[in-house]
Image: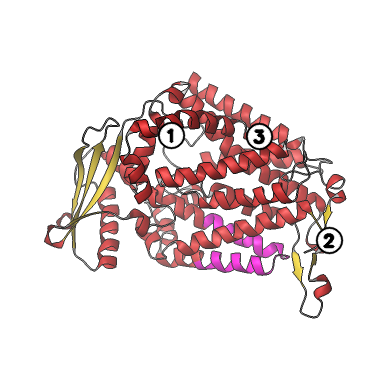
Amino acid sequence: MQTMLATVGLYFGVTTLVFVVSLSRVRPRPPGTVIQGTAIVCALFAALQSSKRPDPFYPLDRWPMYGDAHPVPVYSRYVVLTAGGAQAEYPFRWAFPTEPRVIAVRLDALIRRCNCRRYDVKTDRLLQALAEIYAARHKVAVHGIDVYSVVFSLNGYPDQSVLTYQWRTLDR
Amino acid sequence: MLSIDQRLAIRLRTSALLVWIVVICRQPPDLLPAFLPDAGDGFGIVGILASSTQAAAIIYSQAFVGTVRVTSIALCLLALLRPGSAGILRVAAVFVVVWDSLNKSIGGYANHAQFIPLSLLVIFAIHQVGSYVWFPPGRRDANVTWDASGGSMTSVACALWQSGLCVVLPYTYVGVNRLLEGGLDILRSDALSIHMRSACMAMPSDTCVWLASLPLDAYSGVLAIGLPVVTLMEVLSVLILVSRVFRIGWLLFMLGFQLLAAIGMNIIFWENMVILAVLLCSAIFSSPLGRSAIVVPAGTRSLDRVDTPT
């Protein structure tokens, strides 16, 4: 609780500092400028927090955002299994050009949350949508998608893959 | 006649509109509904609108998403072609906010690559900053002029001030957050190498995979110096509102940093880079030394600095 209060306090401190410094450059100030600016900052904060998600939003939520000093050296691989036993990395950037990481991030969160290796309804639905898109674009039959968690080392040791989730067309 | 502030405001508004047209056009229309979440799991305005199952069925339907997409593109184009009309831009901003919420609902987090262009669109929807007016052929003596009815200096000053806030605050938060989360440990550890490799291998590109294949010793020195400098620049972002020299240096540095993030981590913030490039051009070519081009006093100083129409 104290950490959260300190974080929020610091963010409001930083915001206030930026606000005051920037305001000092506006001269002469149009009437209502301070109220308008304050309203915008508060509305932004309230809008983010009221996004109806189970977790509080940044900055109330301590989002690591590449700030973790001791991150776990791990990433996820999404492997498409097609007819004839062929395997391919799922092309997220091609499938979702504007925000390619979001689907992978959401799937990672769903798999973490369900703590299971098969038959999670939400995860299956997303993977099925990915499989259908892949099949339509590549004109191949997709048999399934495997999700691996890959632990890597910076010292040249080989990567270690662990299967974390399986989706098969027969699961539908 | 256009002042420096008015020109910058118009360029920022145009850039924000162009960014959104490209972003929305690049999104394949049939993909969005397939990935949208359940009722109650949406983001922002969509999370509120689609809180019930019935409402979610409408809002996450192909017809609704397609309508929002096409209307957003059409209104943004119209706002570009009719820059003097505040009403069009305001409606366009509403549609883009809804489309952005739909897009964010897929991942469930705010993509800060699109945060600045979205904020700019909303700001310029609130403040009318005027427009260039192109006269027909035969009147080339004054082919571009200031549309006096389109906006006041007060609106321009307010819009630029709030635009400055929207550029500075996200970068400041990122820097402060990194220090809060990682403390000084992050500056001394191999954390950045691990973050880089995780980000790259999760979404690999040829260049980042090649970089990741190099021995750590080959680039650890660069990272050890680079990370504290990046963090310092982010924390000190507010100074770009005060000093033009710092602003030029900061914008050059951040553009380079975004480019390196694209090469080394395959994280591409082209939307931010467009806005930063517009601000950089303005800071280099338009603004007198020691004065702010992002936030310039309305009425007095800025009226003294009037450019010849081009």
What amino acid type is highlighted by mark number 3?
Val
What amino acid type is highlighted by mark number 1?
Tyr
Crowd around label 2: few <14 · some 14–19 · many ≥20 (10 Å): some
Residue B262 drawn in magenta:
no
Specify the quadrant of the image occupied by residue A42.
top right
What amino acid type is highlighted by mark number 2?
Met
The mark nearer the N terminus, 3 or 2, is: 2
Residue at the spot of label 3: B238
In the rendered image, the vertical position of residue A102 relative to residue B192, given as above or below: below
Residue at the spot of label 1: A66
Q: Position of residue B196 (x, y in %)?
A: 38, 38
Crowd around label 3: few <14 · some 14–19 · many ≥20 (10 Å): many
**Quick check: marks 3 and 2 in contact, CB under 8 Å?**
no
Q: Is residue B207 visible?
A: yes
Question: Which residue is found at the position 61% from the left and 43% from the top?
Answer: B251
Q: Secondary structure at mark 2?
A: loop
Residue at the spot of label 2: B1
In the image: residue B190, left or right of residue B16: left
